[in-house]
Image (tube, rainbow, N blue to C red):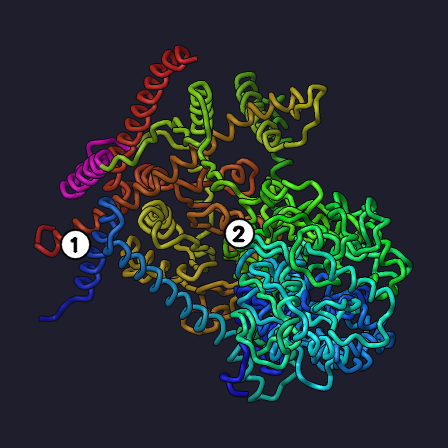
Amino acid sequence: MIMADMVKCPLCGTMNPPDQKTCERCQTPLSGGSFQTGQAPVRKDTGELEPILPEWLRDARETARQSGLDERFKQPDQQQPAASSADLLAGLQSQSASEDEEEVPDWLASITGVSKSKPKEEPAEPTGVRWVETGHKDDFQQEEEVPDWLAGLQAPGAGEEKKDELTSGWSSEQGSFQSPFQSIPESEAPFTPPASDDTPDWLKQMAAEAGEVKNEPAADSTLDWFSQTPAAPPSVPKADSATPFFSSAESAETPDWLSQLQADAAASSASQEAFAAPSGSDTPDWLSKLQADVNTDPQTEEPEPESFTADTPDWLKNLGGTPSREPASFVEPVPAESEPFASDGELPSWLAPEESKKSDSTPIWLKDQSETGADMPAWLSSDAVAEPPQVPQQATDVPPIDDGLIDMPDWLKSVTPEPLIFNEPAQPAPSVDEVPQATSAPAFTDDVPATDGLFTEMPDWLSNAIETPGKSLPAESTSAPDALAPNALPDWLEAMRPMEQAIPGSAALMSDQTLEQRGGLAGLQGVLPAGTGFAPTSKPKSYSNKLSVNDEQMKHAGIFEQILAAETAPEVLITERTLGASRGLRWALSAILIGVILITSFLGTQFLSVPVGVPNELAFAVSVAQAIPENAPVLVAMDYDASRAGEMEAAAAPLFDNLLLLKHPRLTFIASNEAGSILTERFMNGPLAFHIQNGVSYLNLGYLAGGQVGIRAFAQDPLTAMPLDITGQPAWTLPMLQDVRSLNQFALIILITDDANAARAWIEQTQDARGVVPVVAIASAQAAPLIQPYYDSGQVAGVISGLYGGAIVERQYNNGRPGTSRGYWDAYSIGMLLALLSTLGGGFVNWGLGLRKQPVAKGGK
Amino acid sequence: MIFSLDIVTGALGFLFTVMILSYLIGDNPLFKIAVYLFVGVASGYAAAIVIWQVLIPKLFLPTLNIIQTGDYTRGILLVAPWLGIGFILMKISPRLAGTARITMAYLVGVGAAVTLVGALTGTIIPQVEATMNFFDGAIFKPAAEMIEIAFSGSVILLGTVTSLAYFHFGARQKVDGSTRRSGIVNLLAWIGRIFIGSTLGAVFAGVYAAALTALIERISSIVNFLMSLFGLA
């Protein structure tokens, strides 16, 4: 589908297929709708809209046509006259045409010279209702639905242009609502009955006889309502005088009453002021034209008035009379909720005389004509017209019944023009300029709710009373209390006016043609009546977002903020000053200690004495060792780390030196750690090298795996646990282990360890297997306190504790041999002294500091 | 020039000693190098010892001997260690690591049993007997000796009991809601704290003494090396 063929929705802008009637998105009528957004109202031919009228109104229109008042319902050429009166009667005409189509008497037909109208095709009522509801263009009945005789009466091209029959009257060029009985506008082509066979015969006949009728030129009067509709020729009896509606050739079928009317009309000299031209003529235009046309040949082409165009029906032209130059804006108002035309005797006002003149058989409108003294057609200038019809004050007023029309058929009565028009006193018709403009009226008034007088009651023109003009009309029209003031709108007509005009005080608003900018009604002018209180009168107030606070509130807010800040503020924790690592003190002590050691070592000083006292455990250890037999097997467990090798060698060397010198034991070394075997070699080839050199041998079984389990296994079966030595030789066959097959066959077990756990393990695991074999523990200074209980318990025979014990053994029992302990003793002593002084000094300092902080702490509390 | 091995060892010893003593100025790369070397060498030596003194003579050679001789009856005992080795090596695979639990369970079980029996028979019972028997025979001793024995025994007994009471943490909730031990237990624990503190102090002194001795030994070695190196010995 080509985009060019797409139809753009005027509201939402959505592109729709060309065959789409409504927008797919917003359901807005796309084209050909009743109206487009922003589209200015266009005058439409009310005659084309006749199908949408209620049936009763259509009948009324038709009746009106048939009553011989066709000239009042002339269809404008292509444009709908401003007068809305014709629209009002259009229904009557249509109704009359529809109802009485078949009843058109031949006499009338012969009078008018129009062929008998064809049966009117009754428009479908439901469709009409539907049309009214939807208001869619397509809903309107097409021209083909218009009765032929009526269609023929329509102005050429009138069906091409749609007309809003409700608003066209309000949006007329003149902008004024005119009385339905105003004169025919001059600028608009009067109704011209088509010269086709569709024209009713009576109408034709009327046209033909129109030339015989002398019409007084109605200068300025315009029968708007008459010129609006292609009204069927009203079945008004034709007067003998040149009446516009009746041919001079009165047919034999003319009822007597019609003849009577003609006679009376001829005698009357006053014309209906309701049809008075604005220029001040008392004679209605249509009437004037009738008079003028009497003396003219309907066939002759007279210089048509300006208002008469080629479309003007010939019969109307021949009728003469200068139509009013003012275009009659014909607007078919919304049908009032009045009773339809009934043939029950309730004559419309224009047909029925006033109450005051009930006795008068002359039609009121004819009476007025006679009162004015105008050269009225005879049938119009009836002397019986005595009183002007009263302007109906209310739409409910009972229309005056014209006695003379009592005998009139109902269909004719129903289309009887409003007496108001004819009974209007001789007053100059309001000029075009004086006609109140209805410019402020909105173009579209479909949704205007009907007023009370419009829909609830029969229109006043159907009544005998003529209402006063509309309220919006100037007061000048109230000069005649009984007559319709110039430009005065009857109440029923006033009620049909749009809401904008009916709302009191809303003139300004009604005049508001503000174009709607947004919303669903964008583009329309004056769509929504801005009622009081609804329309924004001023720019919306802008409210500030700032809080209005006073000083006290600000203070409170500040206090609250401080409280919150205090809660979120980090609290500084009061921590004691930690004692950091004093690198200087560490370096000083280290320097002193290393210096002393260096000096003493380098100098080999020995000025500090070795302790004299011998601890018991040491004495027992030495005594047990010295009590073994010579060349006894001695098991030595080497379970210390390499880092403790200096201390352990210094502690163990004196005892081993003493044993080797005195007892020559067969030493068997075993270790429960991996480094024990190598430390054994170090020990035997270091401090005890003298003895090795002298042929002392020893056996190194190596590493005993399994920890306590290995020790227990060795204790239970040494041959199985340790079959080989570190060289891979069977150890238990060597001379060192000769006659030794179990643990209890050793003479002594010497435990050299720097770990209390290792000592405990050996002591515990060998408790059962060793029997009475004594165990001597040579322990490091750090393990000796933990091994002491075993000595106290008797499980260990003796304990030699570190360098202290070695020094004592070396001095006391080994005559200072090897001398390693003695060489370390001065440095060891000084070092221990430094440690003692440092410990005591630091304690005292700490104690003093604590004492100084106590008063401060107590003061703080 | 023949470099004596002693000179090399002496020089390395001196070097590593200085590197270890450099910790006085703080942690430094020299100290770490020395430590890493020590750990590495120690681990390597330990591995060598295990292989040469345990696995080969006690597992591989007997197995080989059994295979060579065909005396598989004696090889039955070797099945367990071989299985143990196999199960332990299963820890390499995360999927099969569960099988190592068998060996570990056996080792832990046996070790716990041995340790328990040894602690029981080698420490607890003898220590208890010794504590009880400390006063045994004191009555038959002279007065001075008896007093000394009595006093020593009392101190020992008091230290033992109080030290054990210090590690008693059973308490009851009081009426005021607080949880406290009984008064007697608190008193004994307080006394035991003294003995425990004294013991720890003695141990600390021993540790210091041992370390000092090691330092003296090291420095003496360096001095002797330098003196021998420079011919001042």
Q: Is residue A265 above or below residue A487?
A: below
To which chain does the residue with label 1 belong? B
- Would you place residue A551 above or below residue A527 in this image? above
- The residue that mark 2 highlights is A762
Q: Quadrant of residue A410?
A: bottom right
Whether residue A252 sits left or right of residue A843 in the image: it is: right
Residue type of the residue flagged with mark 2: Trp
Along the line of sight, the residue nearer the viewer: A411 or B130: A411
**Quarter of the image with the N terminus of chain A in it:** bottom right
Label 1: which secondary element: helix
Query: Over which residues does the magenta segment extend?
Result: A584-610
Which residue is located at x 14 percent, y 43 percent?
Answer: A602
Residue corresponding to mark 1: B225
The chain letter for the residue carrying disc 2 is A
Q: Is residue A618 magenta?
A: no
Q: Find residue A498 and report its horizontal and vertical position in percent.
A: 64, 53
| Residue for point 81% across, 74% down | A108
